[in-house]
Amino acid sequence: MQRKKILVNGASTVFYFDAPFSQIDKLVEQNNQFFLTDEAVFAAHTKLFRNRQTIVIPAGEEQKTMSAAEAIIAALLEKNADRSSVLIGVGGGVICDIAGFVAGIFMRGIAFILFPTTLLAMCDAAVGGKNGVNIGGLKNMAGTIKQPDNILYHYAFLKTLPTFQWQMGFAEVIKHACIQSAAMFRTLQLHSLAFYRKDFASLTALIQKNVQLKINVVQRDEQEKGERKILNFGHSLAHALERSHNIAHGQAVAVGMVAAAIISQWKLGFNRAAEVIQLVEKYKLPPMMEFDVDEVVNLIQSDKKSHNGAIDYILLAGVGKPQIVAVSFAELRDFLNRIAAL
Ligand code: NAD
Ligand code: ZN
């Protein structure tokens, strides 16, 4: 097990990589532990929760709502949780996002710890302190920024992760490579999903590298005043596609990154869009999909990142060289129409 303490804006998060599940008992007294998980994780790892106070919610993005958060708070009260309780989220990005949000508002804030159980949550969602819920289908419209006290990487969770979810996780890994690491981009080109599922040492090194890349950005700009925006590479289009079509976050991000890479080629002379497409396909993610451009642009306009008829689009001047560029909606509509015609 490897312990790593990281400071963000004065708040410290201690990461434990390759931790046994029982590590939690060394960190929090048993009667202060309140677990939050979803039905799928609970079913696949029931034994871990034996004799532990656990709130189980249905699985899925539809659970990321205010009413789910309220129900969790009611369940905490029913179990006599108080200000010294610690909420422990065990799950994918949905559970991590709700756990952080509930911990931020329950009795005006209690401590929280995460056990990310998907590749996506290990590499991205659990890290950085952003949390929240969707409102009326609009992604992450209410939430807080609150760093977890600990993040525990218990890699055995990945043994039950379905293939589809592995693919979704690689969308965010490819994102981190595109915006921050030409070296990781190259490594991903050389390997494959099957390789990482078999090679534990390479997988855990990849996860830690992703955590480090994300933390570097969050440490410099926790509140997303500037640089943190680069983590939204591919995401403006992705969030719109998630609303207009019934597709998973990772699939939508893949399509969003490819579109951003092509727009980068037109706007900034980025010359590796073809490699981005190949990488997305290598990790079994969709590079493109059919969508109604006008509908999607309208949805992007309601994104919380849009302002004054334009949106801060994350483009690439090179692999690992992101640029934040204001793109007007008229221009975006034109770009997306050109991409649809390719
Ligand atoms: P998820 O939490 O819905 O998990 C995907 C599915 O896998 C679920 O059905 C879940 O029950 C199941 N699952 C989880 N772990 C499992 C395991 N070990 N074995 C078997 N099944 C398992 O989704 P996700 O892809 O992990 O995360 C997506 C969410 O994360 C989105 O809501 C997205 O907005 C959010 N996100 C947040 C941040 C952030 O910085 N806060 C960053 C990226 C993504
Ligand atoms: Zn994402």
Image (spheres, helix red, strand yellow):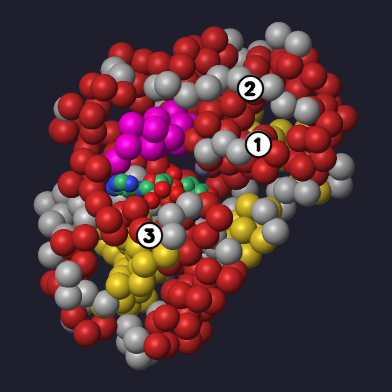
The amino acid on which the numbered mark 1 sits, given as a three-letter code, is His
Comparing marks 2 and 3, which lies closer to the viewer?
A: 3
Q: Secondary structure at mark 1?
A: loop
- Relative to 31, is 97 above or below? above
Sequence-first disc among 3 and 1: 3
User: Which residue is found at the position 24% from the left and 27% from the top?
Assistant: 196
Residue 94: where, in percent of width, then height? 46, 55
How far is the residue under mark 2 from the one under mark 1? 10 Å
Q: Secondary structure at mark 3?
A: strand
Residues drawn in magenta = 161-175
The amino acid on which the numbered mark 2 sits, given as a three-letter code, is Met
- Whether residues under marks 2 and 1 lie with C-beta atoms below 8 angstroms apart, the answer is yes
Kindly identify which numbered label has been placed on residue 289. Answer: 2
Residue 280: where, in percent of width, then height? 47, 20
Residue carrying label 1 = 245
User: Which residue is found at the position 34% from the left and 86% from the top?
Assistant: 79
